[in-house]
Image: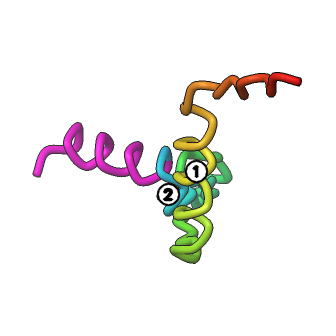
Amino acid sequence: MSAYTVAKYIRQLEEKRLIDAEPTKVRTKSGEVRNGTLLFTIHPIQKAVNYKLEQNLAALPEQKHPRKKK
């Protein structure tokens, strides 16, 4: 896979709240600070399921309750 494709799939997993990816820094022998690799945190699947359910619920149109006639 190309680097672009991998980045796209990482972004999708982050949007679904399945993972977090955070950049790291490394110090070279000369003391220079450079970008390191990404540090991935994998979340429990239930967190992603709850997030998806909340999104679905928020997207539902509000239902108007009919008034009862007296």
| Callout count | 2
Instruction: Give the main secondary structure of the magenta stretch.
Output: helix
Indicate the position of residue 46 as horizontal and vertical percent values. 57, 73
Q: Residue at x 71, y 24 (%)?
A: 66
Q: What is the secondary structure assignment of the residue under circle 1?
A: strand
Q: Is residue 61 above or below residue 14?
A: above
Binning the other alpha carbons within 10 Å of mark 1 as few (below 14), some (14 to 19) or many (20 upward) gives: few
Measured from the top left, where is residue 10 in percent x and y? 37, 51
Q: Residue furthest right?
A: 70
Q: Of the residues shown, which amino acid type is indicated by label 2?
A: Leu
Tell me the magenta residue range. 1-14
Give the residue number, with chain letter if any, for mark 2: 38
Tell me: residue 7, above or below residue 31: above
Q: Please give left or right for residue 22 compared with residue 68 in the image.
A: left
Query: Which quadrant does the C terminus fall into?
Result: top right
| Depth check, front residue: 48 or 55 | 55
First of labels 2, 1 by sequence position: 1
Q: Is residue 4 left or right of residue 26?
A: left
Residue 51 or residue 40, whichever sits in front:
51
Dots 2, 1 in contact, CB < 8 A: yes
Spot the residue most to the front: 70
Q: Residue at x 25, y 49 (%)?
A: 6
Per the image, the residue denoted by label 1 is: 23
Q: Is residue 16 left or right of residue 8?
A: right
Judging depth in this view, the residue of 51 and 28 nearest the camera is 51
On the rendered structure, is 13 left or right of 25? left
Q: Classify residue 5 by image quadrant.
A: top left
What is the crowding at mark 2: few (fewer than 14 residues within 10 Å), some, or many (at least 20)? few
Residue at the image position 47 percent from the left and 58 percent from the top: 37
Q: Amino acid at mark 1?
A: Pro
Q: Residue at x 52, y 61 (%)?
A: 19
Quadrant of residue 63 within the rendered picture: top right
